[in-house]
Amino acid sequence: MDALLIGQVTRVDAEGVEVLVTRSESEVEYEGTSYRVGQLGGYLALPRDKRTIIAFITAAHQKEDVDNGAKPEMMLTCQLLGTVTCRHFLRGVNDYPVIGDPVRIATNEDFKVIFGSQDEGDQAIKRSFTLGRFALDPDFAVRVWGKEFLSKHVAIMGNSGAGKSCTTARVLQEITSLPDSQVVLFDLHGEYSAAFSDEDGNLNKNVTYLGERDLIVPYWLLKYEEFEELLVDRSNPLFVSNQVSFLKDAIGLLKTPAAEELDLLDEMTLDSPLFFALDRLRVFSQNMNEARYVLNTEQFAFSKLAMRSMPPNEQAELLTSQRCSFNKGNPEGEVPHALYHGKLLGLIQKLETRLNDRRYDFLLRPLAKAKQSPLFSEVLREDASSGELTEAMADFIQALLGRRQPRSNLTIVDLSGVPFDIVDITVAVLTRLLFDFNFWSPPSHRHPTLLVFEEAHNYIPRTIDKRSFAREAVERVAKEGRKYGVTAMIVSQRPSELSETALSQCNSMVVMRLNNPEDQAYIRRVVSDQFASLVRMLPVLRPGEAFVIGDAVLMPLRTLIDLPARLPRSGDVDFPLLWSKGTPEADVQSILDHWWRQDRRLLNAPSENSGQQPVLNVEVPEPDPVRTPNPVAFRPQPKPPNLPPYRNA
């Protein structure tokens, strides 16, 4: 090995060593292979008695204080990675080198020992998977330990076009090859179904796709604060407290029938996921916005005199079930409701606007939406009682976790058709639901679940102008999920815009090309100090190349990521090619029809359309009947039992 010696250690500190290169040649030939001396990103070996320390070159410079006329000497700054003992590589160093120790080039023989340490003991269990090839020598496969990679959270980061989507697809294809794996992917741009389909566009059998047809998130799963964010109009600060007070009273009142049916009255809170009819909330708010009392009584002053003498519980039933008429102006013997009269208009308008927007149907009209869904048509029925619809959450969780027959390993939640202003709430509800399910499961029955947050900077922000429910839910998973078998994979092109709490909990990282100095500085802060020097090399990485950092790999490895078996729909548009050869003539009217109807099924989910790639000259679905709110009537909903009297706040 003397032929491989290139220098000696001149400085040692906690972060690594500095090496003086004493060899004059710029290349070393050894057993038919040529090795560059002092190449940035290269590896060195520091031989000891019975062990060899492996180091990574992070910087190279010339020694400046040399005698006149002497050739400048090269100095290398190196990070210590691990130790080879008895032909087995272990991370970390507990026996530091000393000044004067010899240094040699790391060869393929060293790499064989290092990568040979990844051999799996139990062949019956797939403990690791191949992510790519070693950039310095593609003959060596880079394998990732599954337990360390998944149980302690992982981040995949890189510029747009660096290969994040392909890397994510590659990882998920490896993971979902395990027969009982369970992954839920939040797909912001609808690009991953192509990576898990056959050549005809038919989804793999182990994939559940929640897209335009099957994505349903029933509104009664929302927490009260999320309802408040969704419905309260804050444009007029004078009326915000009135709307908040009404919403709290109304939701508690309308959830009571489901709680009674399921014997949950004592346990019910505003956050309990109990069914209530949203149309009843609309009617109730319209009535209370006009409500008046008979002077010096607690009886509502309906315009029909016979209704004024009804018992309080019957009046409450009327107020929540049908539009009631009140006298206008200032009739004698009547007083307007002090808290709500004329002060709920903002809430009413916001609720009606969302109910009449087709894009919100998956959230606010789940029963009507379920009629089109093979997954939920038998579960969310309009003729079901309040209790039955509440208990339908069990079927909803089974579908989300792929626990129906046949079993699926991957659930793709396509968010591309979800209005951006409620992506936050949608991700929050589903993340919280999956975490809470494992939280309340007995330890022996907890099934590990991986949650993949693609383009996470859009809904897990570092700084917020208003409350971010998704950020709170994901940060809880990042901090507590490992204890309950729920782990996160965070994918982003702007790490500097990500929640620092969530990102700092990621023990493994696949970091691709990052050009933005803010992103580099942010990564340098959240990774451990020993890896900070690698961040400086991120701008020079090629597309598809990454540093794999963390406990899941033997040491930080510059890796050429293998392409997935099927690519996601995320490739760059080839402008010169399409502008040279042309594209099919667009049917503008058909495109506008889909645009007006907010129907993206033909664009994002070919698997929902007989497995064919989307074409635009197809029949557009008919609109839903009568979406304009009627001031007198509303859509029929399951009628609850007798309501308790409404209590004036």
Image (cartoon, rainbow, N blue to C red):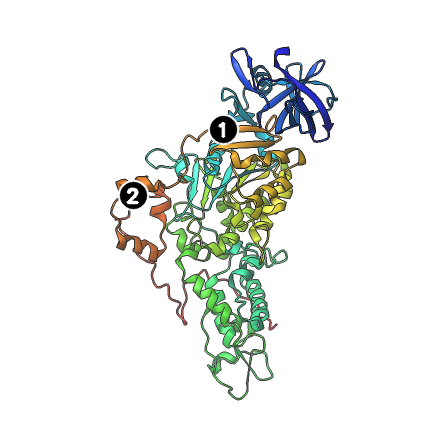
Q: Earlier in the sequence, mark 2 or mark 1?
A: 1
Residue 645: image location, x then y, percent: 57, 70
Residue at the location (46% across, 58% down)?
Answer: 364
Does any portion of residue 179 appear in the rendered image?
no
The disc at residue 116 is none
Q: Which residue is mark 1?
A: 560
Quarter assignment of residue 627: bottom left
Quarter assignment of residue 483: top right
Categorize mark 2 by other alpha carbons within 10 Å: few (<14), some (14-19), many (20+).
Answer: few
Callout 2: helix, strand or loop? helix
Q: What's under tag 2, amino acid-wise?
A: Trp
In the picture, which quadrant includes the N terminus?
A: top right
Q: Residue furthest front?
A: 69
Q: How far apart, in angstroms, are the residues tagged by discs 2 and 1?
A: 32 Å
Q: Residue furthest bottom?
A: 332
Residue 486: image location, x then y, percent: 58, 39
Residue 535: image location, x then y, percent: 59, 36
Circles 2 and 1: CB distance less than 8 Å?
no
Callout 1: helix, strand or loop? strand
Q: What's under tag 1, amino acid-wise?
A: Leu
Q: Which tag is nearer the camera, tag 2 or tag 1? A: 2
Does any portion of residue 142 appear in the rendered image?
yes
Q: Is residue 213 above or below residue 74?
A: below
Residue 643: image location, x then y, percent: 54, 66
